[in-house]
Image (spheres, rainbow, N blue to C red):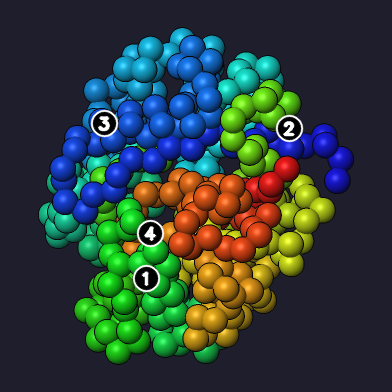
Amino acid sequence: MSNRYAEKQTCISGLGQSEIFRKPKIHPFELALSACEKAIADAGLEPADIRGASCWPAVPSGTSASWGSAGIADVAASLGLSLDWHSSGEMASTLSPIMNAVSAISAGFADHVLCWRGVGERWRPRHALSAAAPSWMEPSGWLEYMLPYHAPSAAIWVACHASSHMQRYGITREQMSAVPIVQREHAAKNPKAIYKDPLTLEQYLQGRLVATPFSLFDCDVPCDGATAVIVSRLEIARDLPQLPIVIEAIGAGAYNRMDTWLSRTDYPRMAMHDAARMMWSRTDLKQSDVDTAHLYDGFSWLAMLWLEALGFCEEGGSGEFVEGGERIRLDGDLPLNTNGGQLSEGRMHGLGHLHEAVLQLRGSAGLRQVVDAKVSVVGNGGGSLGGAVLLRRE
């Protein structure tokens, strides 16, 4: 396909990730700085080379824990960055910084852009607060219709979606169990993962229900940690130490009811379907070219729906696709979330998936390395948020 698409002239040149903690140990802002410093060093750059910065979500100055743990102003000051361009992003979920970086490089604002996502949910828990007394949240917009029914959580919204979709197509919890079970197998090969012990079908089915059809094992694991990457101009990155991982195609489409989780006119689709459609329209590569998939698993169901949205199976076919887990294991047709995903590694909130995809394409994933991985897809988000990126070795 023509190189008129700007992303094909960019790449991931540097990679950094902090330690991941289930119990608070190191202040989340320090974890974010650690990830950023590692990414800059990994790319063979100095802070003076970084002229652009982008994070998700927008984090006010002085915020150092909770949902977002590191804003652009604080990171720039701490690392001594002199920025010509900076931005945060929303609608493409945690891949927004990558897409913003591509745009900045294409416009000539920077040659190297530092992108990161820092989370500190264990240091300052937010999700444990009672929905029955939501003083922590000022309802506005569509949330005004959720909170009176004690439904402030995405677990409830996605559970409604999953229940109706599974009922429509005959997808079972036994089929869905393959996602957390296999990802736990992958996590056993990941030194950073929070949960490494094997998970059996019996344990899964006996797990405490959170919101039907989700049990605890279907829900990702809040943690403290940070991931950072350097997005660079490809022609310059070829002279850097690491193998450039080319950004082959991006997708952030938003075609239908942009601010809703449950009310799209084409339900049961989500924003991920729009993002996937856009991504595939910008490349000649096909689903059969993809060697590994790194798909958002805030809940097991979202990873399955991403498989449908990306066209690895037909609508309603994700249950059969993952059943038994053979297709999604390291030696399967489409290894899924090879680091254990958010269900076992921890909720690194999407950018952890990108980190793992780059490791696989570099051939640096250690015991969980997929043989000769050349193309990887990353899908982030659920509901009204969706972003997709296709990566390849040059």
Residue 49, given in percent of the width and then of the height, sits at: 53, 15
Asked where in the image residue 236 lies, by quadrant, the reply is top right
Q: Is residue 162 above or below residue 324?
A: above
Instruction: Tell me which residue sits at (53%, 25%) in the image.
Output: 44
Q: Earlier in the sequence, mark 4 or mark 1?
A: 1
| Residue type pointed to by label 2 | Gln
Residue 18, given in percent of the width and then of the height, sits at: 33, 40
Give the labeled residue for mark 3. Answer: 29
Real-space Cα separation, disc 3 to disc 2, in angstroms: 32 Å
Q: Is residue 111 above or below residue 288?
A: above
Q: Which of the labelled discs sits on residue 190, or is there none?
A: 4
| Residue type pointed to by label 4 | Asn
Give the labeled residue for mark 1. Answer: 184
Instruction: Tell me which residue sits at (52%, 50%) in the image.
Output: 364
Q: Residue furthest right?
A: 2
Q: Nearer the viewer, mark 4 or mark 3?
A: 4
Q: Is residue 215 above or below residue 195?
A: below
Real-space Cα separation, disc 1 to disc 2, in angstroms: 36 Å
Instruction: Tell me which residue sits at (54%, 81%) in the image.
Output: 326
Q: Residues within 10 Å of mark 3 (few under 14, many from 20)?
A: many
Left-right relation of 180 to 256: left
Q: Earlier in the sequence, mark 2 or mark 4?
A: 2
